[in-house]
């Protein structure tokens, strides 16, 4: 397009020049006693030269007028580039744990870029890395007044509150941060703080908020919710609210059928309320999902007082809810041993051993086989062989924390060793540990640099599977 315009202009000039050449003439100019006589083409040339000179003069004057503003703009741009370089180097120093360099670059970035959210954040993190918590708090407090930095300031102040053990302040700041910008890490922190304080209702509200914002998978949240309902049921029973305790226990068992402590508690509450039929149904439902020795004990309580032979049939009814599970065969075998039905006990123990691996029966199965041999063939010495095998047999499943790997004698909502929430699982000790929701400590938000990759809601323990 530009070339076409240039060609059109050249054509116009050529046409004008040709026209003037074909029609020559003269021009007389008289002004203030001056008289000028010249040809048309010379006058036009002089006017063109004068116009060009005026244009050049005005362009030079405009550049001179704009020169100070241009100088200031270039200076600001140079300061901005140098400030960004200092900011970047400060972040690298933070990641490397170099407190001295981080503070030096922080000061330079703050001088070049003024008090922007990023420079304040870098200064606060550098001060924390150097151990100057007061300076860090001052920077975070200043950052609170910045529209784009309020959330970052809250996150830093939460970490400081956790570091000094001020759980109430950390919870208050976490609620404010969630209202400003929902974050998985802040939700996790607030959730853990509510649990640590025993505020189970508040913890459930936080959990529901995380699910609504899709910060936690629904399946994992359901298991957490069941644990909370279980704890609320315990609190209701302690407060003398029996009906509410039963309702909460039923909800916990319904939300997470594999949470054996909730199912067993629900059944026992029903037994205490003389609702034995409902208790049987509760145990049967749980057994179909997660056969467990605790459920077998509750089932035995339901059948208490019956003759030993009838108890065998009673346990066969329970085993029918999950006939292929090793625990079903073990439960029937124990009932058969009590009734001295040696053949039936041997058959079920054989099936349980085959399920677990015929070459590596667990310690519990070895002891049951020793009991069988002692009862059926007391003089054969086979019981001694099984007792010897039990010494080297693999350990039976127990409650282990999927976070720290520690064993617990009984299930609890919080691991007694690492305080992981919903982290105790019924499994063999050889199973490797995985993540669980942890209660906050000085090593969490307080220590992690804000420029680091943030922790997400840790994968929850799959309890009592």
Image (tube, rainbow, N blue to C red):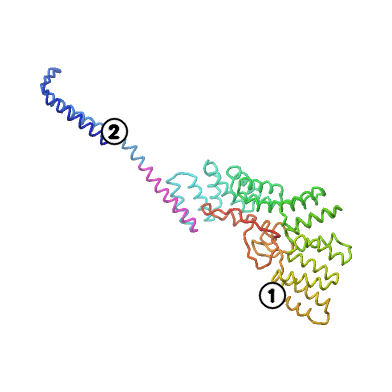
Q: Is residue 86 magenta?
A: yes
- Residue 301 location (% of width, % of height): 84, 61
The quarter of the picture where the C terminus appears is: bottom right
What residue span does the magenta drawing correspond to? Answer: 74-97
Disc 1 marks which residue? Answer: 359
Q: Is residue 388 above or below residue 291?
A: below
Q: Is residue 57 above or below residue 137?
A: above
Q: Nearer the viewer, residue 315 or 75?
A: 315
User: Quick one: label 2, few (<14), some, or many (20+) residues within 10 Å?
Assistant: few
User: Quick one: label 1, few (<14), some, or many (20+) residues within 10 Å?
Assistant: few
Chief SS of the magenta region: helix
Residue found at x 66% / y 51%: 221
Residue found at x 67% / y 67%: 429
239 relative position to 434: left or right: right
- Residue 263 location (% of width, % of height): 76, 56
Q: Is residue 27 above or below residue 231?
A: above
- Residue 128 location (% of width, % of height): 54, 53
The quarter of the picture where the N terminus appears is: top left
Q: Which mark is residue 62?
A: 2
Q: Which mark is residue 226?
A: none
Q: Is residue 69 magenta?
A: no
131 relative position to 204: left or right: left
Which of the 4 image quadrants contains residue 265?
Answer: bottom right
- Residue 99 location (% of width, % of height): 49, 57
Q: Secondary structure at mark 2?
A: helix
């Amino acid at each position: 397009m530009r070339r076409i315009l240039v060609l059109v202009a050249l054509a116009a000039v050529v046409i004008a020049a040709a026209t003037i050449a074909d029609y020559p003439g003269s021009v007389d100019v008289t002004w203030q006693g001056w008289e000028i006589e010249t040809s048309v083409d010379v006058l036009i040339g002089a006017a063109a030269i004068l116009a060009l000179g005026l244009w050049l003069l005005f362009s030079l004057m405009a550049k001179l007028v704009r020169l100070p503003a241009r100088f200031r703009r270039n200076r600001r741009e140079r300061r901005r580039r140098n400030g960004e370089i200092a900011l970047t180097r400060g972040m690298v120093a933070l990641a490397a744990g170099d407190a001295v360099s981080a503070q030096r670059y922080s000061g330079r970035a703050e001088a070049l870029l003024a008090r922007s959210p990023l420079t304040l954040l870098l200064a606060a993190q550098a001060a924390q890395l150097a151990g100057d918590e007061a300076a860090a708090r001052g920077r975070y407090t200043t950052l609170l007044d910045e529209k784009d930095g309020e959330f970052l300031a809250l996150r830093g102040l939460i970490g400081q509150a956790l570091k000094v053990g001020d759980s109430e302040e950390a919870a208050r700041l976490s609620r404010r941060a969630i209202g400003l910008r929902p974050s998985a890490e802040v939700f996790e922190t607030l959730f853990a703080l509510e649990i640590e304080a025993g505020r189970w209702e508040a913890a459930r509200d936080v959990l529901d908020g995380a699910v609504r914002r899709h910060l936690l998978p629904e399946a994992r949240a359901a298991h957490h919710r069941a644990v909370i309902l279980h704890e609320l049921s315990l609190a209701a029973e302690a407060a003398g609210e029996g009906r509410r305790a039963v309702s909460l226990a039923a909800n916990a068992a319904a939300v997470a059928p594999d949470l054996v402590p909730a199912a067993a508690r629900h059944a026992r509450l029903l037994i205490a309320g003389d609702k034995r039929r409902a208790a049987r149904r509760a145990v049967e439902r749980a057994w179909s999902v997660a056969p467990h020795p605790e459920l077998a004990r509750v089932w035995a309580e339901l059948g208490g007082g019956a003759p030993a032979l009838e108890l065998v049939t009673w346990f066969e009814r329970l085993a029918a809810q999950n006939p292929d599970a090793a625990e079903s065969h073990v439960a029937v075998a124990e009932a058969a041993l009590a009734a001295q039905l040696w053949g039936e006990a041997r058959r079920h123990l054989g099936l349980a051993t085959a399920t677990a691996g015929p070459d590596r029966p667990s310690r519990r199965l070895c002891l049951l086989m020793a009991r069988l041999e002692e009862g059926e063939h007391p003089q054969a010495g086979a019981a001694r062989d099984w007792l010897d095998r039990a010494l080297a047999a693999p350990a039976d499943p127990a409650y282990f924390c999927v976070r720290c790997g520690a064993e617990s004698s009984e299930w609890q909502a919080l691991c007694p060793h690492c305080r992981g929430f919903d982290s105790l699982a019924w499994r063999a000790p050889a199973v490797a540990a995985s993540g669980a929701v942890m209660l906050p400590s000085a090593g969490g938000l307080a220590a992690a640099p804000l420029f680091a990759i943030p922790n997400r809601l840790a994968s929850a323990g799959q309890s009592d599977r």
